[in-house]
Amino acid sequence: MNETIPVFYDARQVSQPVSFSPSAAKPRRVVERWQARWFPIDIVVPQPLTEAQLRLAHDAAYVDGVLNCRIANGFGGKDPAVAASLLWTTGSMLSAARGALASGRVAVSPTSGFHHAGHAWGRGFCTFNGLMTTVLSLVASGEVRKVAILDCDEHFGDGTEDIINTLDARHLVRHVTVGAGYSRDPDRFLDALPGIIESFLDCDLILYQAGADPHVADPLGGWLTTDQLFERDYRVFTCARRHGIPIAWNLAGGYQDPFEEVLRIHDNTMRACAAVFFGDST
Protein backbone atom coordinates (compact mmCIF):
# COMPACT_ATOMS: atom_id res chain seq x y z
CA MET A 1 0.00 0.00 0.00
CA ASN A 2 1.26 3.48 -0.87
CA GLU A 3 2.43 5.18 2.33
CA THR A 4 2.64 8.66 0.88
CA ILE A 5 0.05 11.23 -0.14
CA PRO A 6 0.32 12.11 -3.84
CA VAL A 7 0.44 15.86 -4.46
CA PHE A 8 -0.12 16.75 -8.11
CA TYR A 9 2.10 19.75 -8.72
CA ASP A 10 4.10 21.30 -11.53
CA ALA A 11 5.68 24.76 -11.63
CA ARG A 12 3.51 25.52 -14.65
CA GLN A 13 0.52 25.79 -12.29
CA VAL A 14 1.97 29.02 -10.88
CA SER A 15 1.35 32.51 -12.23
CA GLN A 16 1.70 36.01 -10.77
CA PRO A 17 -1.25 38.22 -11.77
CA VAL A 18 -1.59 41.66 -10.23
CA SER A 19 -4.30 40.95 -7.67
CA PHE A 20 -5.37 41.20 -4.04
CA SER A 21 -5.61 37.40 -4.04
CA PRO A 22 -2.45 35.39 -3.37
CA SER A 23 -4.04 32.23 -4.77
CA ALA A 24 -2.12 32.01 -8.04
CA ALA A 25 1.20 31.83 -6.18
CA LYS A 26 0.07 29.35 -3.53
CA PRO A 27 0.90 26.03 -5.25
CA ARG A 28 4.65 26.56 -5.06
CA ARG A 29 4.58 28.03 -1.57
CA VAL A 30 2.56 25.22 0.02
CA VAL A 31 4.51 22.47 -1.71
CA GLU A 32 7.82 23.94 -0.52
CA ARG A 33 6.50 24.12 3.04
CA TRP A 34 5.13 20.57 3.00
CA GLN A 35 8.45 19.24 1.77
CA ALA A 36 10.38 21.22 4.40
CA ARG A 37 8.10 19.87 7.14
CA TRP A 38 8.66 16.27 6.07
CA PHE A 39 5.02 15.48 5.48
CA PRO A 40 4.59 12.02 3.89
CA ILE A 41 4.00 13.35 0.39
CA ASP A 42 5.06 12.38 -3.10
CA ILE A 43 5.16 15.08 -5.78
CA VAL A 44 3.55 13.87 -9.00
CA VAL A 45 3.50 15.85 -12.24
CA PRO A 46 -0.14 16.31 -13.30
CA GLN A 47 -1.48 16.00 -16.80
CA PRO A 48 -2.70 19.36 -18.12
CA LEU A 49 -6.34 19.55 -19.07
CA THR A 50 -7.16 19.76 -22.75
CA GLU A 51 -9.31 22.48 -24.29
CA ALA A 52 -11.85 19.79 -25.14
CA GLN A 53 -12.10 18.85 -21.46
CA LEU A 54 -12.59 22.49 -20.49
CA ARG A 55 -15.48 22.65 -22.96
CA LEU A 56 -17.25 19.86 -21.10
CA ALA A 57 -18.03 22.41 -18.38
CA HIS A 58 -17.60 25.75 -20.14
CA ASP A 59 -18.91 27.55 -23.20
CA ALA A 60 -16.54 26.93 -26.13
CA ALA A 61 -16.29 30.62 -27.05
CA TYR A 62 -15.43 31.52 -23.45
CA VAL A 63 -12.69 28.85 -23.30
CA ASP A 64 -11.17 29.99 -26.57
CA GLY A 65 -11.38 33.67 -25.63
CA VAL A 66 -9.66 33.22 -22.28
CA LEU A 67 -6.89 30.97 -23.55
CA ASN A 68 -6.17 33.34 -26.42
CA CYS A 69 -6.30 36.39 -24.12
CA ARG A 70 -9.29 38.05 -25.78
CA ILE A 71 -11.55 37.59 -22.73
CA ALA A 72 -10.49 38.63 -19.21
CA ASN A 73 -9.55 35.87 -16.80
CA GLY A 74 -10.92 35.59 -13.26
CA PHE A 75 -8.38 38.15 -12.04
CA GLY A 76 -9.78 40.70 -14.47
CA GLY A 77 -6.78 40.73 -16.83
CA LYS A 78 -5.60 39.13 -20.04
CA ASP A 79 -2.12 38.04 -18.96
CA PRO A 80 -0.75 35.27 -21.23
CA ALA A 81 1.12 33.78 -18.25
CA VAL A 82 -2.16 33.32 -16.39
CA ALA A 83 -3.77 31.79 -19.47
CA ALA A 84 -0.86 29.36 -19.83
CA SER A 85 -1.24 28.22 -16.20
CA LEU A 86 -4.94 27.40 -16.43
CA LEU A 87 -4.65 24.04 -18.19
CA TRP A 88 -2.22 23.00 -15.45
CA THR A 89 -4.27 24.15 -12.46
CA THR A 90 -7.41 22.43 -13.70
CA GLY A 91 -5.33 19.45 -14.81
CA SER A 92 -3.92 19.16 -11.31
CA MET A 93 -7.44 18.76 -9.91
CA LEU A 94 -8.36 16.06 -12.42
CA SER A 95 -5.06 14.28 -11.86
CA ALA A 96 -5.58 14.34 -8.09
CA ALA A 97 -9.08 12.92 -8.53
CA ARG A 98 -7.68 10.08 -10.61
CA GLY A 99 -4.95 9.55 -8.03
CA ALA A 100 -7.51 9.23 -5.25
CA LEU A 101 -9.61 6.82 -7.32
CA ALA A 102 -6.55 4.70 -8.10
CA SER A 103 -5.51 4.34 -4.45
CA GLY A 104 -9.02 4.33 -3.03
CA ARG A 105 -7.82 6.84 -0.46
CA VAL A 106 -6.62 10.41 -0.90
CA ALA A 107 -4.72 12.79 -3.19
CA VAL A 108 -4.05 16.52 -3.27
CA SER A 109 -4.23 19.31 -5.82
CA PRO A 110 -2.43 22.37 -4.34
CA THR A 111 -4.66 24.78 -6.27
CA SER A 112 -7.28 27.47 -5.76
CA GLY A 113 -9.55 29.56 -7.96
CA PHE A 114 -12.34 27.28 -9.15
CA HIS A 115 -15.80 27.71 -7.67
CA HIS A 116 -16.72 31.22 -8.88
CA ALA A 117 -16.18 30.24 -12.53
CA GLY A 118 -19.49 29.60 -14.27
CA HIS A 119 -20.38 28.09 -17.62
CA ALA A 120 -19.52 31.18 -19.67
CA TRP A 121 -17.87 33.51 -17.18
CA GLY A 122 -15.19 33.83 -14.56
CA ARG A 123 -14.86 36.12 -11.53
CA GLY A 124 -13.68 36.26 -7.95
CA PHE A 125 -10.16 35.09 -8.91
CA CYS A 126 -11.66 32.03 -10.64
CA THR A 127 -11.38 31.53 -14.42
CA PHE A 128 -12.19 27.87 -15.11
CA ASN A 129 -14.05 25.58 -12.73
CA GLY A 130 -11.60 22.79 -12.00
CA LEU A 131 -14.21 21.04 -9.86
CA MET A 132 -16.79 20.67 -12.61
CA THR A 133 -14.25 20.01 -15.37
CA THR A 134 -13.01 17.16 -13.20
CA VAL A 135 -16.50 15.77 -12.57
CA LEU A 136 -17.51 15.90 -16.21
CA SER A 137 -14.19 14.54 -17.51
CA LEU A 138 -14.43 11.54 -15.17
CA VAL A 139 -18.04 10.90 -16.10
CA ALA A 140 -17.28 11.21 -19.83
CA SER A 141 -14.47 8.67 -19.56
CA GLY A 142 -16.64 6.25 -17.57
CA GLU A 143 -14.40 6.39 -14.49
CA VAL A 144 -17.24 7.47 -12.19
CA ARG A 145 -21.02 7.66 -12.15
CA LYS A 146 -21.43 10.47 -9.61
CA VAL A 147 -19.10 12.79 -7.69
CA ALA A 148 -19.58 14.77 -4.48
CA ILE A 149 -18.23 18.31 -4.16
CA LEU A 150 -17.82 19.43 -0.55
CA ASP A 151 -16.97 23.12 -0.81
CA CYS A 152 -15.77 24.42 2.57
CA ASP A 153 -14.53 27.71 1.22
CA GLU A 154 -16.13 30.66 2.99
CA HIS A 155 -18.06 31.73 -0.10
CA PHE A 156 -20.95 30.33 -2.10
CA GLY A 157 -19.86 28.20 -5.06
CA ASP A 158 -22.00 30.16 -7.49
CA GLY A 159 -20.00 29.16 -10.56
CA THR A 160 -20.33 25.48 -9.72
CA GLU A 161 -24.08 25.88 -9.32
CA ASP A 162 -24.30 27.76 -12.62
CA ILE A 163 -22.58 24.93 -14.50
CA ILE A 164 -24.70 22.26 -12.84
CA ASN A 165 -27.88 24.14 -13.72
CA THR A 166 -26.84 25.13 -17.24
CA LEU A 167 -25.87 21.57 -18.15
CA ASP A 168 -28.67 19.92 -16.14
CA ALA A 169 -26.01 17.86 -14.35
CA ARG A 170 -27.58 17.49 -10.91
CA HIS A 171 -27.75 13.70 -11.37
CA LEU A 172 -23.97 13.59 -11.80
CA VAL A 173 -22.89 15.65 -8.82
CA ARG A 174 -23.90 16.20 -5.20
CA HIS A 175 -22.83 19.77 -4.43
CA VAL A 176 -22.62 21.01 -0.84
CA THR A 177 -21.31 24.57 -0.59
CA VAL A 178 -20.96 25.84 2.96
CA GLY A 179 -21.11 29.41 1.70
CA ALA A 180 -24.76 28.83 0.75
CA GLY A 181 -25.82 29.52 4.32
CA TYR A 182 -24.74 26.69 6.60
CA SER A 183 -24.83 27.58 10.27
CA ARG A 184 -22.04 29.91 11.37
CA ASP A 185 -22.17 28.22 14.77
CA PRO A 186 -18.87 26.27 14.82
CA ASP A 187 -20.13 23.41 16.99
CA ARG A 188 -23.26 22.89 14.89
CA PHE A 189 -21.24 23.02 11.68
CA LEU A 190 -18.61 20.53 12.88
CA ASP A 191 -21.29 18.20 14.22
CA ALA A 192 -23.05 18.29 10.82
CA LEU A 193 -20.02 17.09 8.85
CA PRO A 194 -20.48 13.33 9.42
CA GLY A 195 -24.04 13.55 8.12
CA ILE A 196 -22.91 15.51 5.09
CA ILE A 197 -20.33 12.84 4.25
CA GLU A 198 -22.97 10.13 4.73
CA SER A 199 -25.09 11.90 2.12
CA PHE A 200 -22.28 11.13 -0.36
CA LEU A 201 -22.54 7.34 -0.05
CA ASP A 202 -23.93 7.06 -3.59
CA CYS A 203 -20.90 8.92 -4.96
CA ASP A 204 -17.67 7.39 -6.24
CA LEU A 205 -15.43 10.27 -5.17
CA ILE A 206 -15.36 13.42 -3.03
CA LEU A 207 -13.77 16.65 -4.21
CA TYR A 208 -13.05 18.67 -1.06
CA GLN A 209 -12.29 22.39 -1.07
CA ALA A 210 -10.50 22.95 2.26
CA GLY A 211 -10.72 26.74 2.24
CA ALA A 212 -8.63 28.80 4.66
CA ASP A 213 -10.88 31.85 4.43
CA PRO A 214 -13.47 30.83 7.07
CA HIS A 215 -10.76 31.72 9.64
CA VAL A 216 -11.77 34.29 12.26
CA ALA A 217 -8.92 36.59 11.21
CA ASP A 218 -9.53 36.40 7.46
CA PRO A 219 -10.75 39.71 5.99
CA LEU A 220 -13.21 37.78 3.79
CA GLY A 221 -14.18 35.17 6.38
CA GLY A 222 -14.50 35.20 10.11
CA TRP A 223 -16.05 32.37 12.14
CA LEU A 224 -13.69 29.38 12.70
CA THR A 225 -10.51 29.34 14.76
CA THR A 226 -7.31 27.61 13.66
CA ASP A 227 -8.13 24.63 15.88
CA GLN A 228 -11.69 24.45 14.53
CA LEU A 229 -10.43 24.48 10.93
CA PHE A 230 -8.12 21.59 11.79
CA GLU A 231 -11.06 19.77 13.36
CA ARG A 232 -13.14 20.43 10.22
CA ASP A 233 -10.48 18.82 8.06
CA TYR A 234 -9.90 15.95 10.47
CA ARG A 235 -13.61 15.09 10.56
CA VAL A 236 -13.97 15.27 6.78
CA PHE A 237 -11.00 12.95 6.20
CA THR A 238 -12.05 10.60 9.01
CA CYS A 239 -15.58 10.23 7.68
CA ALA A 240 -14.43 9.75 4.08
CA ARG A 241 -12.01 7.04 5.16
CA ARG A 242 -14.61 5.36 7.38
CA HIS A 243 -17.04 5.10 4.48
CA GLY A 244 -14.38 4.12 1.96
CA ILE A 245 -14.96 7.09 -0.36
CA PRO A 246 -11.82 8.33 -2.14
CA ILE A 247 -11.20 12.04 -1.57
CA ALA A 248 -9.19 14.59 -3.57
CA TRP A 249 -8.71 17.95 -1.89
CA ASN A 250 -7.52 21.38 -2.88
CA LEU A 251 -6.75 24.69 -1.14
CA ALA A 252 -9.45 27.21 -2.15
CA GLY A 253 -9.51 30.68 -0.52
CA GLY A 254 -7.44 32.43 2.14
CA TYR A 255 -6.59 36.14 2.29
CA GLN A 256 -4.97 36.95 5.62
CA ASP A 257 -2.08 39.35 5.90
CA PRO A 258 0.56 38.21 6.63
CA PHE A 259 0.15 35.42 4.10
CA GLU A 260 2.09 33.14 6.44
CA GLU A 261 -1.13 32.68 8.40
CA VAL A 262 -2.92 31.29 5.34
CA LEU A 263 -0.05 28.91 4.68
CA ARG A 264 -0.21 27.64 8.27
CA ILE A 265 -3.87 26.73 7.77
CA HIS A 266 -3.01 24.78 4.62
CA ASP A 267 -0.23 23.05 6.59
CA ASN A 268 -2.84 21.99 9.13
CA THR A 269 -5.05 20.49 6.43
CA MET A 270 -2.13 18.38 5.28
CA ARG A 271 -1.39 17.50 8.91
CA ALA A 272 -4.97 16.31 9.41
CA CYS A 273 -4.82 14.33 6.16
CA ALA A 274 -1.58 12.60 7.15
CA ALA A 275 -2.90 11.83 10.61
CA VAL A 276 -6.10 10.23 9.35
CA PHE A 277 -4.70 8.22 6.45
CA PHE A 278 -1.21 7.37 7.73
CA GLY A 279 -1.21 8.01 11.47
CA ASP A 280 1.45 10.66 10.88
CA SER A 281 1.22 13.84 12.97
CA THR A 282 4.38 15.50 11.63
Image (tube, grey):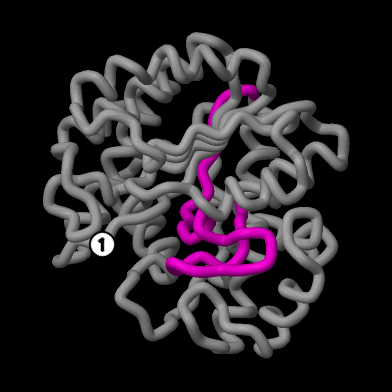
Q: Position of residue 139 (x, y in %)?
A: 81, 37
Q: Residues within 10 Å of mark 1 (few under 14, many from 20)?
A: many
Q: Residue at x 40, y 24 (%)?
A: 236
The N terminus lies in quadrant: top right
Q: Nearer the viewer, residue 189 or 203?
A: 189
Magenta run includes residue 101: no
| Amino acid type, mark 1 | Tyr
- Can the viewer see residue 172 in this picture? yes
Q: Residue at x 29, y 56 (%)?
A: 254
Magenta run includes residue 118: yes
Task: In the rendered view, tell whether residue 72 sits above or below residue 218.
Answer: below
* Lateral position of residue 57 relative to residue 190, left or right: right
Secondary structure of the residue carrying tag 1 is loop
Q: Position of residue 248 (x, y in %)?
A: 55, 37
Task: In the rendered view, tell whether residue 262 sits above or below residue 267.
Answer: below
* Lateral position of residue 207 relative to residue 39, left or right: right
* Lateral position of residue 154 relative to residue 163, left or right: left
What kind of secondary structure does the magenta stretch mostly adopt? loop
Q: Nearer the viewer, residue 32 or 121?
A: 121
Q: Which residue is mark 1?
A: 255
Q: Position of residue 219 (x, y in %)?
A: 18, 60
The C terminus lies in quadrant: top left
Q: Residue at x 57, y 24 (%)?
A: 105
- Can the viewer see residue 152 in this picture? no
Task: In the rendered view, tell whether residue 88 sits above or below residue 72.
Answer: above
Q: Residue at x 34, y 70 (%)?
A: 21
| Extent of the magenta region | 104-130
